[in-house]
Image (spheres, rainbow, N blue to C red):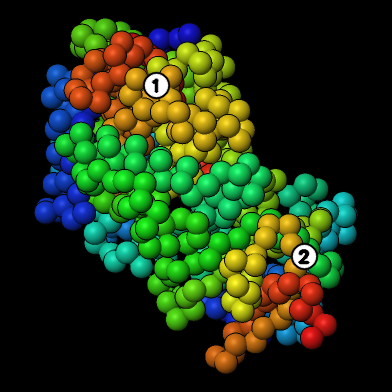
């Protein structure tokens, strides 16, 4: 599986971190960690700009993070019209921040910066695979 | 404070929704106005810097085409790009070429003819002005990114949608005075608050309009400037910085770090402080962007920018008039032309030629021009 499977619409097919998508299919959302200097990167990357190392290992991101910011999108760019409205979010997991969508099922009035969120893997009918964030208290249901 | 490079000529087309002519004809208008303003001919220009964001216009490698049409062959020409801040990047490179002694006179030409594609296509391209591997696949776009900055600012400082509406009301008031602006209607707070939500909390009137337009600046070294121009406007300070393209690399979203760094550098080079600026043009692609600019430029402490707009301090007659030409919000935002248009406004202000928008006695002006969502930042301080 190549990186063209990632997200609603991918603009990239080939990347050295395409394994991210395979791991996503296994239910894991991973960052990369530099084996030389230990820095952790999300988005995952193949190269370390601090020590120039290119030996990376995959590490799962923490189970929960806190909402850093969000927006509910009502007007979509070309290719995303069918999805509106949808919520974009930036979530802080401590060592890394992750950009993505907050579940559309979450009412905008209940969204609060700082709330606890958990990422889940989402497979779309057309075969695309992605992740989205859901409030932590809903996870047990 | 150095006075080595001056702006001796400025030109700009009217910014319109749909320019009735070709790209080359549109750029010619701005170029001809700048040449007449400077009182020179194309033969006296040593190099042309063509500033534009690719993919909005059909013409590829526009420098070659424009140098021919403007009569600038065989002098060197090339394209510079930093999306929405392309033409102030042009000023930075033009300044360097002149200071290095490679050229005496340089033309900085900015343009965009956005009407060649649809608004949804344009948002898709703007979305690809962010990380295309890790953010664009979620349907990101410029209003959404700035909306996320607004939500962060609201949460941290208690800023409200009404505060942002006040910024648009101010822009519309001055846009109505500016014959070159695309949006000439005056708006009320209610109209702003009742406009459709684009990306919460930003509504239609929190967003600038796409537009067609071109701008041109003629830069010269001190000898040529003094010989040619009765009213040279000097580049006193320049600052530039960059920030991670991905939001995941940023410490906070309630301001733009690159803007703060560029401002610090520009103030330092000019030997000036924020309190000494008489008039400013800031990159208000969205209302929240102007509010963050107040704070990033040091006109207000972080979180206190709202007091400037609530108290009218950034209007004509206030402590630091900002965007009294309508800003991007009302003047329109033809990406590559915008920085040049901002510089033109300040040059006219410092010459005392800004008409109904004039800040009386303005001596020092500042331009803040941002590319993408705070990815590229240029701050320029000008003085007469």
Q: In which quarter of the image is residue B284?
A: top left
Q: Name the side, left or right, on which B170 lies relative to A47.
A: left
The answer to whether marks 2 and 1 sit on the same chain is no
- The residue under label 1 is B318
Q: Quadrant of residue B341?
A: top left
Q: Is mark 2 on a helix, strand or loop?
A: strand
The quadrant of the rendering that contains the C terminus of chain B is top left
Q: Which residue is drawn at 52% across and 25% down?
A: B299
Extreme-bottom residue of the structure: A125
Classed neighbour count for the residue bearing mark 2: other residues with Cα under 10 Å, few (<14), some (14–19), many (≥20): some
Position of residue B266 measured from the top left corner of the image (x, y, whole percent): 52, 22
Position of residue A101 measured from the top left corner of the image (x, y, whole percent): 61, 70
Q: What element carries label 1?
A: loop
- The residue under label 2 is A116
- Above or below, comparing residue B329 to residue B196 in the picture: above
Q: Which residue is drawn at 41% across and 28% down?
A: B312
**Residue A20 or B251: which is nearer the viewer?**
B251
- Above or below, comparing residue A18 to residue B174 in the picture: below
Which chain is indicated by disc 2? A
Residue B23 shows up from this direction: no
Position of residue B120 measured from the top left corner of the image (x, y, whole percent): 36, 68
Q: Name the side, left or right, on which B232 lies relative to B382.
A: left
Position of residue B147 measured from the top left corner of the image (x, y, whole percent): 52, 55
The disc at residue A120 is none
Q: Distance between the residues labelled 2 and 1?
A: 43 Å
Q: Residue at x 55, y 90 (%)?
A: A126
- Above or below, comparing residue B317 to residue B22 in the picture: above
């Amino acid at each position: 599986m190549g990186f063209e499977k990632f997200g609603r619409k991918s603009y990239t097919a080939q990347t050295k971190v395409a394994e991210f998508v395979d791991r996503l299919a296994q239910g894991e959302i991973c960052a990369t960690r530099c084996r030389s200097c230990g820095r952790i990167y999300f988005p995952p990357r193949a190269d370390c700009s601090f020590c120039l190392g290119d030996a990376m290992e995959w590490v799962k991101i923490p189970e929960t993070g806190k909402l850093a910011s969000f927006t509910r999108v009502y007007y979509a760019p070309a290719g995303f019209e069918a999805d509106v409205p949808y919520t974009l979010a930036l979530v802080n997991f401590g060592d890394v921040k992750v950009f993505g969508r907050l579940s559309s099922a979450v009412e905008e009035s209940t969204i609060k910066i700082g709330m606890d969120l958990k990422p889940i893997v989402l497979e779309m009918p057309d075969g695309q695979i992605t992740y989205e964030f859901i409030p932590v208290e809903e996870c047990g249901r | 404070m150095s006075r080595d490079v001056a702006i001796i000529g400025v030109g700009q087309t009217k910014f319109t929704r749909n320019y009735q002519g070709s790209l080359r004809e549109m750029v010619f208008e701005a170029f001809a106005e700048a040449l007449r303003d400077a009182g020179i001919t194309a033969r006296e220009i040593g190099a042309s810097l063509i500033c534009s964001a690719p993919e909005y216009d059909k013409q590829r490698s526009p420098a070659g085409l424009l140098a021919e049409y403007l009569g600038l062959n065989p002098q060197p020409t090339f394209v510079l790009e930093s999306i929405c801040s392309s033409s102030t990047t042009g000023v930075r490179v033009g300044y360097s070429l002149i200071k290095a002694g490679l050229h005496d006179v340089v033309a900085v030409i900015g343009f965009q003819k956005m009407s060649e594609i649809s608004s949804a296509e344009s948002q898709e391209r703007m979305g690809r002005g962010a990380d295309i591997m890790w953010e664009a696949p979620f349907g990101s776009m410029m209003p959404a990114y700035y909306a996320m900055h607004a939500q962060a600012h609201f949460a941290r400082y208690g800023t409200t949608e009404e505060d942002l509406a006040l910024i648009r009301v101010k822009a519309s008031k001055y846009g109505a005075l500016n014959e070159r602006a695309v949006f000439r209607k005056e708006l009320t707070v209610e109209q702003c608050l009742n406009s459709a939500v684009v990306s919460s909390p930003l509504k239609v009137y929190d967003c600038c309009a796409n537009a067609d337009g071109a701008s041109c600046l003629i830069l010269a070294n001190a000898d040529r400037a003094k010989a040619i121009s009765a009213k040279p406007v000097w580049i006193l300070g320049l600052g530039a910085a960059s920030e991670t393209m991905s939001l995941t690399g940023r410490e906070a979203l309630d301001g733009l770090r690159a803007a703060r760094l560029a401002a610090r550098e520009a103030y330092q080079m000019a030997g000036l402080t924020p309190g000494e600026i008489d008039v400013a043009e800031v990159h208000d692609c969205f209302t929240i962007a102007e509010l963050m600019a107040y704070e990033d430029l040091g006109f207000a402490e972080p979180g206190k920018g709202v007091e400037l707009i609530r108290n009218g301090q950034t209007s004509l007659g206030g402590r630091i008039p900002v965007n009294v030409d309508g800003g991007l919000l009302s003047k329109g935002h033809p990406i590559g032309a915008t920085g040049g248009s901002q510089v033109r406004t300040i040059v006219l202000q410092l010459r005392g030629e800004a008409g109904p928008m004039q800040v009386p006695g303005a001596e020092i002006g500042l331009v803040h021009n941002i590319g993408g969502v705070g990815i590229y930042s240029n701050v320029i301080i000008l003085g007469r």
